[in-house]
Amino acid sequence: MKPSIFFLLLALFAFSCQDDQEPIDHFPQTWKIAGWQNSGFGGDLGFQPITDSTYTYLFKKDGTFLKTVGDESIAGTYKTEVLNYEVGGKRTNYTLFFPEDKLRNSCSANVEGMYIDENKLLVGGSAACDGPTNFFSLVR
């Protein structure tokens, strides 16, 4: 009886961790802004939550995305890359390509880079050029 309880508990723990997978395999994905943080020359203001915004990304399985900020939208293409680190584990990077330089939030023309962090938030923005870092949560 003891071995069967041990295997039952082992199976329970093994299957309970399956929700920890990154959402990269599930499409479509809709990400809505959860907040921002500025740590440039203005100092670190800490995380500033946002709850009433219509700033979203919609990623489709075919490699296209739709970015919406308020009443404006732009469609483009994206690619993902999964990187494995010895320290910190796995990280999924998104590279977004914009057909025109509109609604882009980065330091580079027609391109945005984002990644999924350890808190399962999609992170991007223009922090490299003293802009804010934006954090997006997956809409389920």
Image: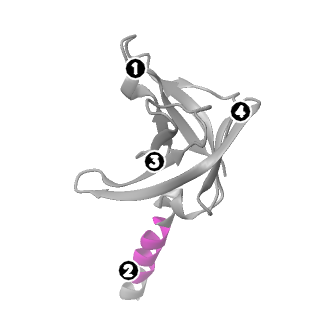
1 or 2: mark nearer the eye: 1
Q: Are marks 3 and 2 in contact (CB under 8 Å)?
A: no
Q: Position of residue 88 (x, y in %)?
A: 29, 50
Badge 3: few (under 14), some or many (20 or more) residues near its Cα, within 10 Å?
many
Which label is found at residue 6? 2
What residue is rendered at 45% in x and 64% in y?
17
Q: Position of residue 97 (x, y in %)?
A: 53, 46
Give the amino acid type for the residue marked by disc 2 in the picture.
Answer: Phe
Element at badge 3? strand
Label 3 or label 2, whichever comes before in sequence order = 2
Q: Left or right: 131 with respect to 52?
A: left
Q: Is residue 14 magenta?
A: yes
Name the element at disc 4.
loop
Give, as a single range, the part of the protein colored magenta. 7-17
The residue carrying mark 1 is 130
Amino acid type, callout 4:
Thr
- The residue indicated by pointer 3 is 116
Dot 2: within a 10 Å radius of its alpha carbon, few (fewer than 14), some, or many (20 or more) residues? Answer: few
Q: Which structural element holds mark 2? A: helix
Is tag 1's residue or tag 4's residue first in the polypeptide sequence? 4
Task: Answer with the quarter of the image where residue 100 lies.
Answer: top right
Inspect the image, locate mark 3, and give the three-letter code of the amino acid beneath it. Ile
Q: Quadrant of residue 107?
A: top left
The numbered mark, 1 or 3, whose residue comes first in the sequence reads: 3
How far apart marks 1 and 3 lie (CA) works out to 21 Å
Q: Is residue 58 visible?
A: no
Residue at the spot of label 4: 54
In this view, 49 is above or below 11: above
Q: What is the distance, in whole Å, between disc 3 and disc 4 at their CAs? A: 20 Å
| Disc 1 + disc 4, Cβ < 8 Å | no
The quadrant in which residue 84 appears is bottom left
- Is 29 located above or below residue 62 in the figure? above
